[in-house]
Amino acid sequence: MEEIQHVMSTTKELITDRFSKAQTTYDANALAQKEIAVRLNELTSEAIPQNYSPSSMFEIGCGTGLLTRILLSRYSFDTVHLNDISDVFTPFFSDLEEQYDYDFYVKDAEEVILSRKYDLIVSSSVFQWFDHIPSFLEKIRQHLSPEGIFAFSTFGPQNVKEIKELTGTGLAYFSKEEWTELLSNHFQIVQTEESRIQLQLSSPREVLNHLKQTGVNAFKHQKTIWTPAKMRQFEKQYRNLFSIGEQVGLTYHPLYFIAKLKK
């Protein structure tokens, strides 16, 4: 297959802005993302041999630290290097400086220049925002230690499908099969999984608020002016199509991959 280009309707500036604004509301509203971080940790721990203890970790797109804190409680790292595109998250990890060989890369992860290899490279709910996945995977290959684990979650084509169906706004997600092919260039996949998480929210308006509070609404062309008439139409269509009893549904479509370098 020809190299897959991930064309997305986003800009990194907008992503930075939306997630920065959501820093104080993210944890309380990121219900699906919390569940995904927990499951990614479980799959990672199953893949790491009992006689192998990773001493160094690099996390891509750490945000408020939903996955970070889980991993820090499970493994005895010497080196903990984190990354996020926004500097508003650095205070969330101020306690790590005295405990580890610690660094925080405030930069678009696709542009970060790394100087070492890591035993564990992880990322949860981030790669769907990237522009050039094939070249980024090459970077990961170069900086994963020989026995290291590369573990990540991202989202598949059915993610927040309700919004895309009604507004035409959304990302161009890779399927599980496309990710498998991309990874096969450099990695041996140890385990992969996909699932659906359906949140139930009180109203269509609350769906929009949920997306805002978690920063998930970082789409470049999302310029809808929500006049009262447009909001009424959106709410009516959403309830007609996606009602669950008195509530409405919102779908998340997580994909999980645990990989290691090809021998």
Image: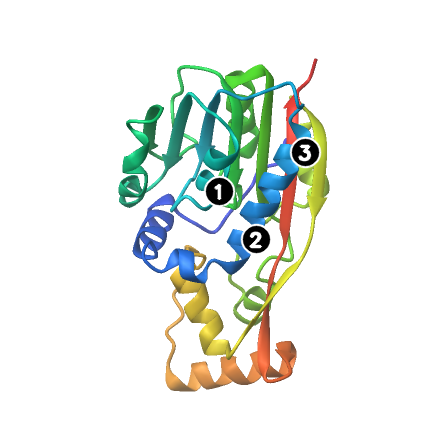
What residue is shown with label 2? 35
Task: Give the quarter of the image for residue 28.
Answer: bottom left
Residue 207 rendering spot, x and y as whole percentages: 49, 71
What residue is shown with label 1? 67
What residue is shown with label 3? 46
Q: Is residue 48 left or right of residue 221?
A: right
Q: In the rendered image, is residue 132 in sight? A: no
Q: Secondary structure at mark 3?
A: helix
Q: Quadrant of the C terminus?
A: top right
Q: Residue at x 36, y 60 (%)?
A: 25
- The residues bearing labels 1 and 3 have C-alpha atoms spaced at a distance of 16 Å
Residue 145 rendering spot, x and y as whole percentages: 55, 15
- The residues bearing labels 2 and 3 have C-alpha atoms spaced at a distance of 17 Å
User: What amino acid is at disc 3?
Assistant: Glu
Residue 127 rendering spot, x and y as whole percentages: 52, 41
Q: Are marks 1 and 3 in contact (CB under 8 Å)?
A: no
**Image height of 128 relative to 161, above or below:** above
Give the mark, 1 or 3, whose residue is nearer the N terminus. 3
Q: Residue at x 29, y 35 (%)?
A: 95
User: What amino acid is at disc 1?
Assistant: Leu
